[in-house]
Image (cartoon, rainbow, N blue to C red):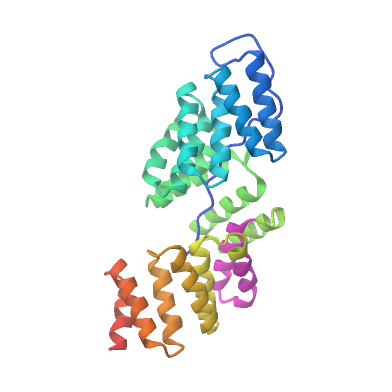
Amino acid sequence: MGLSPVLILSALVLGEVKVHAQGLFDFGGEAVSQFNRGKAEQDAGNLKEAVTWYKKTIATDDRYFRAYNNLGYIYGGKGYHTQAIEWYKKALLANPRFVEGYSNLGASYMELGKPEMAVKILEQAVKLNSKSAIAVVNLANALEKSGDHARAVRMMVKARELGDDGIKSDVADVNRGWLLEKQGDVEGAISAYRSAIQNNASNSEAHMNLGLLLTRRGQLEEAQPLLEKATKLDASNAMGHVNLGYLYLQKERWAEAEKACRKAVQLDPKSVLGWSNLGLAYVNQGNRGGARAAWQQAAALDPEDETVRSNLKKLR
């Protein structure tokens, strides 16, 4: 029930763009001025104005790949990943060697639940620049989601060797914790997640992963506020509510477990764990009909789940 780290969008262009002699991807004064205005508006949080200026940049010079990239970043940040993908693709058409564009495109495919597609894109990013820690981390996460655990761990080891240049410290700590978990170093993982929270108290993944690790160790009182905070920081994350429900089940707080699990399956109706744990919450409150319905739903989603099948048999 753990969460792998979030995929990392490459950093936006920082500061102003300086005009050099014209080369393959150098741009003239008007496009530069428009881009810089867009970046200034974006830094100020004025995203509509930023979008307007980036589109003006492209109208002036349709080779301006960083303007496409920043538009993708804005749309992706709003949750419009399909639109973000289209902008990243345009960035790569303008500059086929733009590593950050490949990395961001791969991250967007992951957000859409297409890890196999993300792997192909991110492999290209790493091929172009094997020293890009962001691209390597994103490839590791995509490989993990696509089921290639062994290669994912190798990529995370490589990312660790490269260092965390260009990656926010809290995100780097979450990635480090994830890697240590995979290597069996639980204490090291706990320390990394604590460091992430210290660096950024709003990092939901750090709260989630630390809370779940502590739950597995039986440290329920310490885990509870972490998992509760994680669901507040990212209320749309179904797995967060599954994990919180699991903790409440461990504490025999059946009504709270039911509430968390119902929220989980509302957000993700295909969550076998959510339905399975919801059944446990129901049956421990004497609601056998509710438990049966929940477990039947879980069994329909995964007929091979032995735990669910066994629980249904016990209700007969």
188 up-or-down from 131: above or below: below
Give percent across and percent down for residue 50: 64, 33
Res 194 → quadrant = bottom right
Q: Is residue 171 visible?
A: yes
Q: Looking at this view, is 41 or 314 the one in front? A: 41
Magenta stretch contains residue 226: yes
Give percent across and percent down for residue 35: 64, 25
Residue found at the far bottom of this picture: 286
169 up-or-down from 2: above or below: above
Res 219 → quadrant = bottom right
Residue plotted at (67% across, 58% down): 197
Q: Is residue 130 visible?
A: no
91 up-or-down from 222: above or below: above
Residue plotted at (61% across, 48% down): 172
Residue found at the far top of this picture: 21
Magenta stretch contains residue 141: no
Q: Looking at this view, is 306 or 110 the one in front? A: 110
Q: Is residue 315 left or right of residue 281?
A: left
Q: Is residue 145 left or right of residue 103?
A: left
Q: Provide the major secondary structure of the magenta segment.
A: helix
Q: Looking at this view, is 152 or 274 the one in front? A: 274
Give percent across and percent down for residue 254: 51, 83
Q: Is residue 142 left or right of residue 314?
A: right
Q: Report the span colored magenta.
A: 203-229
Q: Quadrant of the C terminus?
A: bottom left
Residue plotted at (48% across, 22% down): 94
